[in-house]
Image: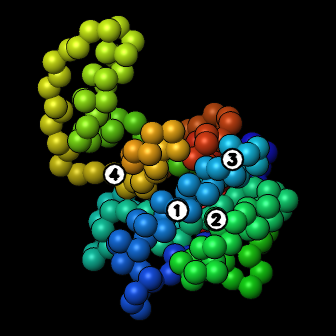
Amino acid sequence: MKKPTHYVEVRILPLDGSVPSGGDVAFVTTKLMRCVHEHIVDGYAVAVSFPELREEPQGNTPIGTGSRIRIFGDAGALAALLVRQEFAQMVGAAAISVGASPIREVPGECRWEVLQRWREPEKHCDGFALRAARRKFRRDGKAEQTVAPKARKKQPPYFIMDSASTGQRFRIFLKRIPAEAHNVGQVNTYGLGVPVPAW
């Protein structure tokens, strides 16, 4: 992905109160990230960041992705995202807000970071051992007894995705790393894994 020149800042709005609840954020983030995923699959180069991402609790703010999501790309890719039916429906239903002039230029001076999908915590989720056993059975034709992994004491931030092929839900855990520690590559289908501006 080329260095992004523009972004859209999405704010998740409260669905039934004065501030977005954890449930509001989780529900809308799942819908929004599904829309971003489909946009990338359709051939648009966009990447995401979570400016309010908390990897450690801070005061009353728990670990999580927060209620703001920035979507980066060139102006054309972002304009196409804004008119996608699913995205426009979220704006129309007042689930998200993008402001009066939604496509903005990336500031000239900002630091860069990379949000990666972190697979290690997936091994500690319910169902991981069962899915691994099913995959092994399909591949080898043998059932193997598995031991459920021990639960982690602290879970990193994540968002939930719905699989288009199976309909099952799964977590995408996030890990923030400095852009200097990352080799520039291709954005993955969740909009992660490439340097994006942070401020």
Residue labelled with disc 4: 156
Foreground: disc 3 or disc 4: 3
CA distance separating discs 4 and 1: 20 Å
Question: Taking 76 as reference, is 12 left or right?
Answer: left
Question: Taking 170 as reference, is 110 left or right?
Answer: right
Foreground: disc 4 or disc 2: 2
CA distance separating discs 2 and 3: 14 Å
Q: Is residue 89 above or below residue 174?
A: below
Q: Residues within 10 Å of mark 1 (few under 14, many from 20)?
A: some
Asked if residue 63 shows in the view, the reply is yes
Q: Earlier in the sequence, mark 3 or mark 4?
A: 3
CA distance separating discs 3 and 1: 15 Å
Q: Residues within 10 Å of mark 4 (few under 14, many from 20)?
A: some
Residue at (48% x, 60% y) in the render: 30
Residue labelled with disc 1: 31
Asked if residue 7 shows in the view, the reply is no
Measuring from the top left, give residue 108's x and y in whole percent: 77, 65
Q: Is residue 91 above or below residue 124?
A: below
Foreground: disc 4 or disc 1: 1
Q: Amino acid at mark 1?
A: Lys
Residue labelled with disc 2: 86
For label 3, the SS is: helix
For label 1, the SS is: helix
Measuring from the top left, give residue 32's x and y in whole percent: 56, 62
Residue at (20% x, 14% y) in the render: 144
Residue labelled with disc 3: 40
CA distance separating discs 4 and 2: 28 Å
For label 2, the SS is: helix
Q: Amino acid at mark 3?
A: Ile
Residue at (31% x, 23% y) in the render: 134
CA distance separating discs 3 and 4: 25 Å
